[in-house]
Amino acid sequence: MYKRILLAYDGSAPGQQALLDCHEIAQWSQAELTLIAVMPMLLTAIGPEGGVYDESLQESEKARYQAILDAGVRRLADAGLNAHGEVVIGDAVNEIANCAHRIAADLIVVGHKHLDGWAARWWRGSVSKTLIEHAPCSVLVVITR
């Protein structure tokens, strides 16, 4: 039985489907839900010496991620579930695995959309595939096409 479920949530169509599936599992097991939105570190003005950190851009993006996250938490809370969320900054796989360790999650739920073409799959990689290798618990990958 799952008692602590971590949902990696970004508001996308796969994320929305994962939210719905997570909702059903949480109701069934009466689990506590933690939603996490992972924002990449934003660099601007990339040159020969590297990137430059832009704090104002970072803060506006964090506010955008927080709004998406708040909408997901509100949707679950309105359904009577115990849910809360947080925005973190960094590599998606590392941040999701770290959060799962920190909250002692029994299950991680992520959405996944199949990418068209081998080049897109090669260039972008698969967070869900890599997460399975690093996760401290079971991972449910919700697939949309």
Image (cartoon, rainbow, N blue to C red):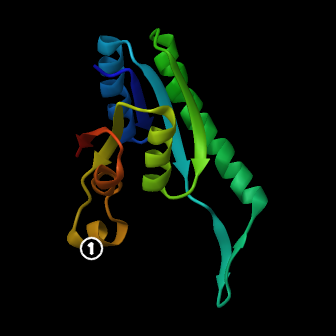
Q: Position of residue 37 (x, y in %)?
A: 52, 42
Q: Is residue 9 visible?
A: no
Disc 1 is placed on an element classified as: helix
- Residue at x 73%, y 51% (from the top left corner): 59
- Extreme residue in the right direction: 56
| Residue located at (33% from left, 64% from top) | 125
Which residue is painted at 59% across and 29% down in the image?
Answer: 70
Tell me the quarter of the picture where residue 66 sits. top right
Residue 106 shows up from this direction: yes
Query: How crowded is the residue under tag 1: few (<14 C-alpha within 10 Å), some, or many (20+)?
Result: few
User: Residue 54, relative to residue 27: is it above or below?
Assistant: below
Residue 109 % position (x, y): 34, 36
Most distant residue in the bottom direction: 48
Where residue 19 sits in the image (x, y, percent)?
Answer: 38, 29
Relative horizontal placement of residue 91, taking residue 144 as reference (left or right): right
| Residue 16 coordinates in the image, percent (x, y) | 38, 33
The residue beneath circle 1 is 119
Reply above or below: 66 against 26: below
Which amino acid lies under the numbered mark 1 shown in the image of this protein? Answer: Ala
